[in-house]
Image (cartoon, rainbow, N blue to C red):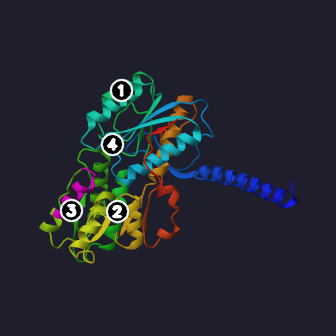
Amino acid sequence: MPTSTLKKTVVSALTASLGLIVSTAVLAAWFPYQAESTTPPFAADGKKADVAYTPLAKASKKWQICVSFPHMKDAYWLGVDYGVVEEAKRLGVEMQLAEAGGYTNLSKQISQIEDCVSRGANAVVIGAISGDGLNNLIKSLAAKKVPVIDVVNGINSPDISAKSLVSFYTMGQSTGEYLAKKHPAGSPAVKVGWFPGPAGAAWVEAAHKGFMDAVKGSAVTVLDPKYGDTGKEVQAKLVEDVLQANPDVAYVAGTAVTAEASVGILRSRNLDKKVQLLSFYMTPGVYEGIEKGSILAAPADSMVIQGRIAIDQAVRLLEGKDVMKHVGPKIFVVDQKNIKTVKLDDILPPTSFKPVFSVK
């Protein structure tokens, strides 16, 4: 072999090896992750403590994990999907994901989970449509020794095995505090249209309470909350109705879908300089809106990490390993002042990522 060819071959081999090392490093780069644990687990008034979350290196066997989401209609759940998919791959377990199509489809979510377990799932990760509506199902799963992990939305059942989520009370509170600081008591009053999401969902009720508590005593007046499914058409209609009835509204605040849908609505009505937008959680669309200045701010709950932790918790429970039973990423508010310093891979999926429903 000529020397030049040999050199090229060696360089190619080294480059390939380096690529593998870099790829592995990227997969491992999410941990240890700065998170917050709650003690005792599942207690509403539990004590919070800062922790550095580190997952298992690998599962001991190819466990089958069922994942259930309310829907995949917005980029938020795409982010959670990315988290559960990547962590299932990293740990070496199988994952099957079902989405119920919307927050009105509780019975569909229940039947999807039942079907998944009947096909042999060893553990179930649930982004719940309802805080209480799955309690009977979860009780039956607990009786069968099938671990159930509550991811993102919040479930009130005492039979839950672990929770990977943040406090949506704190998410709503962080958004409300941001507004209250801009409009403290004694300053001119401002009106806010408030769109917390689908009525009855535990995360919506928690965010609503946090937001309302945070603006108490400030110059912020919140209009009657407008509840609705987090589909763009539903949220757009709600926003248009509020803008029509309240020409003096200064802010539209609510779900990420609300904020994303409102960007075009405000522009078409020439209100984009008069009405400002806030979301109480982060999606790629909201992030882009903050970058461009069309959305003011949003707390980041690192939904990708919540998905990753949920899969790790499931494997730990199945293998009898130590598990943090109630943990979630630390919340921080993103606006134009700090957006350039945020580590994007922790809080959002890659722009090229498409929904994945199965990992073998």
Name the residue: 38% across, 54% down. Answer: 75
Label 4 close to label 1 by CB (< 8 Å): no
Depth check, front residue: 270 or 197: 270
| SS type, badge 3 | helix
| Residue bearing the label numbered 3 | 239
Which of the two discs, 3 and 2, labels the residue nearer the N terminus? Answer: 2
As for residue 264 lying within the magenta part, the answer is no
Residue at mark 2 to residue at mark 4: CA–CA distance: 24 Å
Which label sits in the foreground, 3 or 1?
Answer: 3
Quadrant in which the N terminus appears:
bottom right
Amino acid marked by disc 2: Thr
Which label sits in the foreground, 4 or 1?
Answer: 4
Magenta part of the chain: 229-240
| Residue bearing the label numbered 2 | 175
| Residue bearing the label numbered 1 | 139
Q: Is residue 352 left or right of residue 128?
A: right
The 10 Å Cα crowd at callout 4, few under 14, some 14 to 19, many 20 or more, is many
| Residue bearing the label numbered 4 | 70
Residue at mark 3 to residue at mark 1: CA–CA distance: 39 Å
Q: Is residue 193 left or right of residue 177?
A: left
Residue at mark 4 to residue at mark 1: CA–CA distance: 20 Å
Name the residue: 40% across, 23% down. Answer: 118
Label 2 close to label 4 by CB (< 8 Å): no
**Quarter of the figure with residue 177:** bottom left
